[in-house]
Image (tube, rainbow, N blue to C red):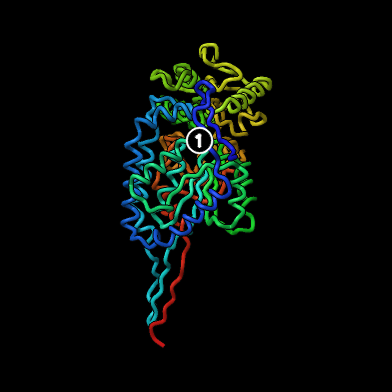
Amino acid sequence: MSEMVKLISPVDGSVYAERAAADAAAVDRAVTAAKAAQPGWAATPLDERIGLCLKALDALLAMNDDIIPELAWQMGRPVRFGGEKGGVEERARYMASIAKEALANIVPPERPGFKRYLKMEPLGLVMVIAPWNYPFLTAGNTIFPALMAGNVVLLKHAAQTLLVGERFAEAFKKAGLPEGVFQNIVMTHEGTEKLLGSGLVDHVNFTGSVAGGKAIEKALAGTFATMGLELGGKDPAYVMADADLDYAVANLVDGAFFNSGQCCCGIERIYVHESRYDAFVDGFVDLTKQYKLGNPLDAETTIGPMAQTRFATWVREQTEEALRKGAKAHIDTSAFPMDKAGTPYLAPQVLTNVNHQMSVMREESFGPVVGIMKVKDDAEAIQLMNDSPYGLTASIWTEDLDAAERIGGEIDTGTVFMNRCDYVDPGLVWTGVKDTGKGAALSQVGFANLTRPKSFHLRKEH
């Protein structure tokens, strides 16, 4: 009997979907089909590969009305936000637009009597292990460019978002992708580790926890497979003395609490220049109080449940530890009737009087809580922003472009934002430093990470 993978909905705790995990024979069939399909797919003209990917994108976008409530049931995002259609389309179409240039041969200066160039060849079988928090966006970041580059793809989606993998498979089938080029597979952790250790996978892209990334790296040991790992963040914001305060407040509240704070690049800690601190905190708290916690299927809900009760429990524990150590909570959770311990429903919380001896300012929360600290100058802000084991994004709120570039150059991070946050620009590389992981997605660099260079050194005269 195959092990069943169950999707427990955060909306009401019911089993929303369950699927049988692939057994060893099914995994073998999937890998065999992928390996058989890859040479033909790589030989397919690039324009045709791009065209089929864009047809699949169109098919996926056409499902959006059904996908929106499915996402609410699967991981709790309110239906009012409309799913992930816009971001998926922007990223896929951008990667399609640069594919020819990014995958073109690299030709060094001419040398008489020789023809020399570097050809960007696909890696082969790419496995995407996708997370539940932005299940279409994160998976699409690798799936579309990997296929455009001539790879075949095996998608293992998170148990919390089982139906997302099926939606991708349906879209590629409607587009007429050749058999075996894209496959969705349901697997257990044990089955995944066994496949990774087999040496049959050429590249793995994983978005998830640091512990998960370490397990994948360990499973791949000795196979020489390449990998892209995005493993979390504790993304900071620095509000400078000259910041447009109303603008900063509006964007940082959204950056902290959208998707119930379950964003890889969401705002988890804020440092405010002492001259603007009180006004910023007042504005931030006032706007946070306007959120409505509730059933994500209700159009009035602006913050839904976290994906699982255990995630909400962790955030509650972080908050309680901070309060024991002297932090001040600004949100009366009784104003959010759905907030109940032992459930995934958790009100947004704003903490001050925090410091870096508190977990909430150092360890990833991945939930709707944010700590705000006062700083006296840029040097203190930089020191605190860098006092983290993570480094995905950091945002600087100022009217001084030169200052933002200077300060950004001193921050250990993958992306520096000025006057925006919690956004992925497909024209820029998506990467991180320290425990946030390794590798890169999107932009021309993303294509480079999904291909390998092959040199042609051809002597025409001898």
* 112 w.r.t. 93: above or below: below
Residue sitting at 59 percent across and 34 percent down?
Answer: 364
Is residue 238 something one can see in this rendering? Answer: no
Front in this rendered view, residue 307 or 24? 24
> Number of callouts in the render?
1
Front in this rendered view, residue 270 or 378? 270
Relative to 337, 321 lies left or right = right
Residue sitting at 60 percent across and 55 percent down?
Answer: 198
Q: Quadrant of the N terminus?
A: top right
Around disc 1, counting alpha carbons within 10 Å, would you say few (fewer than 14), some (14 to 19), or many (20 or more)?
many
Front in this rendered view, residue 348 or 220? 220
Outermost residue, bottom side: 462
- What percent of the width, then of the height, locates residue 23? 57, 45
- What percent of the width, then of the height, locates residue 293? 48, 18
* 237 w.r.t. 122: above or below: above
Per the image, label 1 sits on a secondary structure element best described as loop
Instruction: Identify the residue under disc 1.
Output: 132
- What percent of the width, then of the height, locates residue 438? 55, 49
Front in this rendered view, residue 390 or 403? 390
Three-letter amino acid code of the residue under disc 1 = Trp
* 154 w.r.t. 13: above or below: below
Is residue 131 something one can see in this rendering? Answer: yes
Residue 79, quarter of picture: top left
- What percent of the width, then of the height, locates residue 424? 43, 41
Outermost residue, front side: 1
Residue 200, quarter of picture: bottom right
Residue sitting at 62 percent across and 34 percent down?
Answer: 363
Relative to 286, 85 lies left or right = left
Q: Quadrant of the C terminus?
A: bottom left
